[in-house]
Image (cartoon, rainbow, N blue to C red):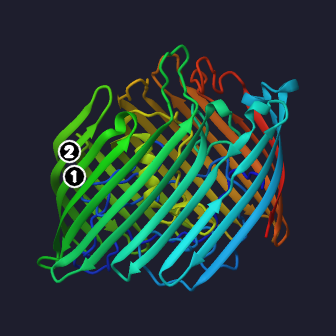
Amino acid sequence: MALAAGVAIAGPCGLARADGGTGSGAVASSSSDATAASPTQSGSTALNPAASGLETLGGAPPFGSAVRLGNVGTLSNAPGSGAFGSGSGGLGGGAAPAPFLTIVPSIGASEQFVTGGNYGGNGRNGHEFVTSINPGLLINGATPRTTFTLDYNPSIQFYSNQPQSNGINQSLDGVIDATLLPRSLTVEARAYATDQATSGGLSPGGTSIYNNNNTTLTQSYSVTPSFNDVFRLGTLNLFYSAQYTRQSGASAYLPGANQPYFRSNNLFAQTEAGSFTTIPFFQRFDDTPSFSATEDDGTGVLSGAHQYFIADKLRYALTPYVVLSASGGYEDIAYSGIPPTLIRDATWSIGTTIRFPEGGVLKARYQHMYGFNSPYIRFDYQLTARTTLAASYSEVLSTQQQGVGLGVASSSVNSVGLPVGGLSGQPVLLTNQSLSVQSGLTKNKQLSASLTTQFARDVVSVSFQAYQDTLVATSPGLAGFSQKSASISLSESHELSERLNALFYLNYGRTSSPALGASTTSTYGASAALTYRVSPTLYANTQISVTNQGYNSFGGGGVGYSGYGNNGVETIFTVGIQKTF
């Protein structure tokens, strides 16, 4: 299994109704929307006090530079297959799928020739050869009450000149969605694992090779049962979520620092939440009292932390497509750290939800939450039958561990093993490799936007993402720093023939931090790949990618380690094959 850069995801681009409404003049009797930004490494997913469940944004699709060849075309005959297939939806119901089970084991191999960068620059004669063995397993299944998807694609890598870098890169995505009681009780289990560069400075999608001293293995697992029932006076929603998230790897230091800014950490979080949405009053009003309580048992700032919310939201249906809302409540938030963080404050928000008859939704509000005022915007719109526009903006108080854990818990996995938004069905970025991995508490701002167009043989996407993490508190014994990044990318997938696909990817970004010795750096990448289906079960591909690796002053693992700094431009030539069974 070789690596394919910039895979543009093909498949239907229809958008789900965000509020489950019927389009009638009355306010739909559904639970209140949650505040959540696209679940990325920056810790941008959090529970709204008005939330009765988890929600993800249909924001910018993360067309990264390290997308695996993986399972292209392996499920063309399976129900719900395709890049946006319904093999594993979110917590929602819908028609029961026809029973099926598809198990696709695979084995692949690739050879990479690396010049420049961290490996080629340090290798013998200025280059390096990396041999990868890629076993894989993709399982899709469905019964009348259960759907599940598991995609496991580790990469076992051998370096010819630097054997100390030999290792295994992990890649796991899995989801089980079970309905225990029709229309009332569901359970979803979610698993996720990936490797990422500790020091960041890459395009958001990452790269295909990592230095062992500069690699963080991020894992997250969650179980979320939820219950809802309709009573005479309204709809009751209850849910519980247990999440375990771990980030492990070598400690990372800034140059000359005695304390690391990253050390292996873990988090176990439990969330209980509920809401009751009344029947419409006077045909146009409804009311939703709600609560949310999260207890954290983790390391650093998450030791003994908690986030408690209560709120009451009133909604008014101005028209069949425009709903106005206002809410008020109270929050109790506590984090350990230096300095300790304690927020006990009133919360409020005013906003609107607009549903477009042609497809799409706009949610906008201004709120006081996490102790500060901020806007929240989510916009998904079907411009044409072929073109989808998505944009989002949010500000939250969180840690990266919380962001990953809640992002994983609130996303789903489609039938080819890609993480997708639970409501939108579009790919989501669960770890963002433009930022360094840290353990502190930060105020996160995130803006994303994407435009995706499908033609008969092409899928073209333009994506913009901007992140800003402002340090609020550090974990005891650890350093920390603020950081921000912005990037724009262009991705295209072109079907040259029935058997041959071409993949193109371009990215440019800037990353900066006021940390000692860190300066603003530019990152860029470009790649082109060809994937050829030799037979129904055998694929071959070739690829060339050119990137620079930024954060010239940011360290990776160990005191004095220079990360990717001053190693110039990296070029990787890849050839590979994959056999499915």
Residue 242 pos. (x, y %): 38, 57
Q: What mark, if any, has residue 91 been given in the picture? A: none
Q: In the image, is 381 to the left or to the right of 508?
A: left
- Give the residue drawn at x 30%, y 72%: 321
Q: Quadrant of the N terminus?
A: bottom right
Residue 114 falls in which quadrant of the image? top right
556 w.r.t. 85: above or below: above
Query: Tag 2 or tag 1, which sits nearer the N-term?
Result: 1
555 w.r.t. 410: above or below: above
Q: Mark 1: which amino acid?
A: Phe
Outermost residue to the left: 282
Q: In the image, is 220 to the left or to the right of 85?
A: left
Q: Which residue is mark 1?
A: 309
Q: Quadrant of the C terminus?
A: bottom right
Q: Mark 2: which amino acid?
A: Asp
- Give the residue drawn at x 57%, y 51%: 193
State if disc 2 and disc 1 touch (CB < 8 Å): yes
26 w.r.t. 206: above or below: below
Q: Which residue is mark 2?
A: 332
Q: Circle 2: is it few (<14), some (14-19), or many (20+) Cα within 10 Å?
A: some
Whole-angstrom CA distance, mark 1 to mark 2, is 7 Å
Q: Helix or strand or loop: what does disc 1 sit on? A: strand
Outermost residue to the top: 256
User: Is residue 91 in view?
Assistant: no
Number of disc labels: 2
Who is closer to the viewer here, 116 or 379?
116
- Give the residue drawn at x 79%, y 33%: 163
Residue 7 pos. (x, y %): 68, 56
Q: Helix or strand or loop: what does disc 2 sit on? A: strand
